[in-house]
Image: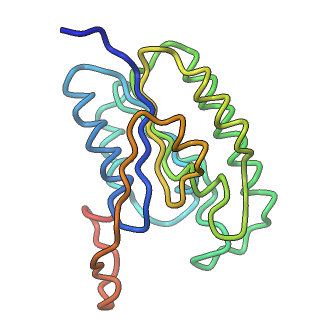
Amino acid sequence: MAARRGLIIVYTGDGKGKTSAALGAAMRALGHGWKVLVIQFFKGDWPVVYGELELAKRLYPQFEVLQLGRGFVKIMGDKKPFDEHVEAAKAALQLTRERMLSGQYDVIILDEVNYALGYLDFKLIELEDVLQLLRDKPPQMHIILTGRNAHPQVLEMADLVTEMKDVKHPMKKGIPAQQGIDY
């Protein structure tokens, strides 16, 4: 068996399934006894019970999900000061660095970090900080980044990039997000 080489994986695109793909990879890693950390850059401070968070409560300490965001920025009724979102994203990135360098994890998922880099008309964290994080990644650790519009420099550093394409979505027919499928 070949020695493990940690990959940088990006799930991006305008279709559904980026976080789901990352969580699927997490399930495989957990099945091999690996330790997985998920840092969510937007989820948090929102009245929705996410299935991955509920599962993490059962699988802790092997599987840990940290919802460090303050909710979606400038959409879905967000009224929080923009600086609050920036502070939360910067703190999430700093915590990611600390946990990444701790040697405790085999896989770290940066859920919706691509949004924090400048999706829509806002930017919460600096591209160079994310690129440096990826450069400093321990050689055997896998890091997965999710979110639309991944930055070209992130794509360049990645070993694997998958783009989800929106072909058909139930919300276009007025069907709301479904528990157990969407959250």
Q: Within the image, what quadrant is residue 96 found in?
A: top right
- Percent across and percent down for residue 53 are 39, 47
On-image quarter of the N terminus:
top left
Residue 86 image offset from top left, x and y in percent: 75, 53
Residue at 63% over, 26% down: 97
Numbered label tally: 0
Q: Quadrant of residue 98?
A: top right
Residue 37 as seen in the image, left or right of residue 114: left
Residue 152 horizontal side relative to residue 144, left or right:
right
- For the point 58% across and 29% down, the residue is 134
In this view, the residue in front, 15 or 45, is 15
Along the line of sight, the residue nearer the viewer: 158 or 42: 158
166, above or below 171, in the image: above
Picture quarter with the C terminus: bottom left
In the rendered structure, the answer to whether residue 94 lies left or right of residue 63 reads: right
Whether residue 159 is situated above or below residue 62 in the rendered picture: below
Q: Is residue 127 above or below residue 163?
A: above
Q: Residue at x 38, y 38 (%)?
A: 160
- Tell me if residue 129 comes above or below residue 71 in the rendering: above
